[in-house]
Amino acid sequence: MAVGGGITGDITGFVSSIFKRGINYINIPTTLLAQVDSSIGGKTGVNSNLGKNLIGSFFQPVLVMIDVNFLTSLSKREMICGYAEILKHAVINDAKFFYWLKLNSNNILNKNYKKLIYAIKKSCEIKADIVSKDAHEKNLRMTLNFGHTFAHAIEVKNNYSKKINHGEAVLMGMMMATKFSYIKKICTKATLEKLIKIYEENNLNFKIKSIFKNFNYKKFLQHMQNDKKNNDDKINLILLKKIGQVTNPGSFKFSKDQINKYLKNII
């Protein structure tokens, strides 16, 4: 039984999957991030020096129990961390939910439990629907990685320290992916501006240079290439078409040189 945040759930799920070739486990997530993301979908894993979650398995819990009362003790920073994944689910899959978030993000971040319950339920429904169609991440499930190739590289570059948490990295990664989408003419400037506005209205930091004073572009690109979603020398990116719709997995792969060309413009 895992009672805790995403790391607790991931380690418990991973150990459960390999002990006696698999034993049942129950996941009781106690952070907003775990409740809306890692507890749903059965992906378990641990980090390595080469990248995030490179060692892991697909193993579903027999039960996930979510109780918003666990969130009472969470800091604003931890609430933002979970909110990042809620926002991602809206951006990639549900424009109506995105516009609901525009009106209710402040309520979520300030623990209005009625709004929180709706946001958590909606977020879980979006992820569960996608996972049910592609449990082992062969195609559709890769859309859930929107912004994460950038985000995981940020986390590795930061040695997984508390200087930046997963949600903060995801917020930066989603903005980088959206700016890259705009530069490549996959989404409009209006779409980019909608995302920027919801960030600004909720004081969400998306400026990497505020975290890293000396940014090593070459090393960052290497971290991106090591991401588990890449299986050749190209970097696979999920890009944004419009609010509620992203590109098909595998349809946009770039060389390190191609991404490096635009990297300074999206950081």
Image (cartoon, rainbow, N blue to C red):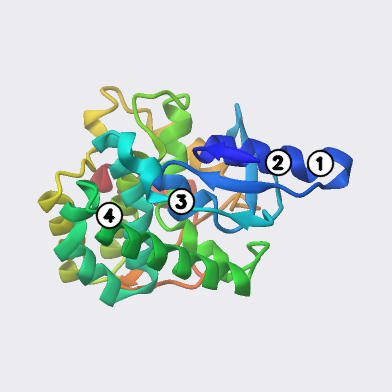
Q: Nearer the viewer, mark 3 or mark 1?
A: 3
Return the residue at label 3.
Answer: 35
Left or right: residue 56 versus residue 94 is right
> Can residue 149 be seen in the rendering of this structure?
no
Decide which of tag 3 and tag 1 comes sooner along the chain. Answer: 1
Q: Amino acid at mark 1?
A: Ile
Left or right: residue 18 versus residue 186 is right
Q: Nearer the viewer, mark 4 or mark 1?
A: 4
Q: Position of residue 235 (x, y in %)?
A: 52, 52
Decide which of tag 4 and tag 3 comes sooner along the chain. Answer: 3
Residue placed most toward the observer, 163 or 18: 18
Q: Looking at the image, do the residues carrying marks 4 and 2 touch, with CB atoms under 8 Å apart?
A: no
Return the residue at label 4.
Answer: 113
Residue lying farthest right? 20
Q: Amino acid at mark 3?
A: Gln
Q: Looking at the image, do the residues carrying marks 2 and 1 touch, with CB atoms under 8 Å apart?
A: yes
Q: What separation in Å lies between label 4 and label 3 (alpha carbons)?
A: 14 Å
Disc number at residue 14? 2
- For the N terminus, the quadrant is top right
Q: Position of residue 74 (x, y in %)?
A: 32, 35
State the residue at coordinates (30%, 59%): 178
Q: Amino acid at mark 4?
A: Tyr
Q: Amino acid at mark 2?
A: Phe
**In the rendered image, which quarter is residue 133 located in?**
bottom right
Q: What separation in Å lies between label 3 and label 2 (alpha carbons)?
A: 18 Å
Q: What separation in Å lies between label 4 and label 1 (alpha carbons)?
A: 37 Å
State the residue at coordinates (21%, 41%): 205
State the residue at coordinates (10%, 52%): 201
Return the residue at label 1.
Answer: 18
Left or right: residue 228 versus residue 208 is right
Element carrying mark 4: helix
Q: What separation in Å lies between label 2 and label 1 (alpha carbons)?
A: 7 Å
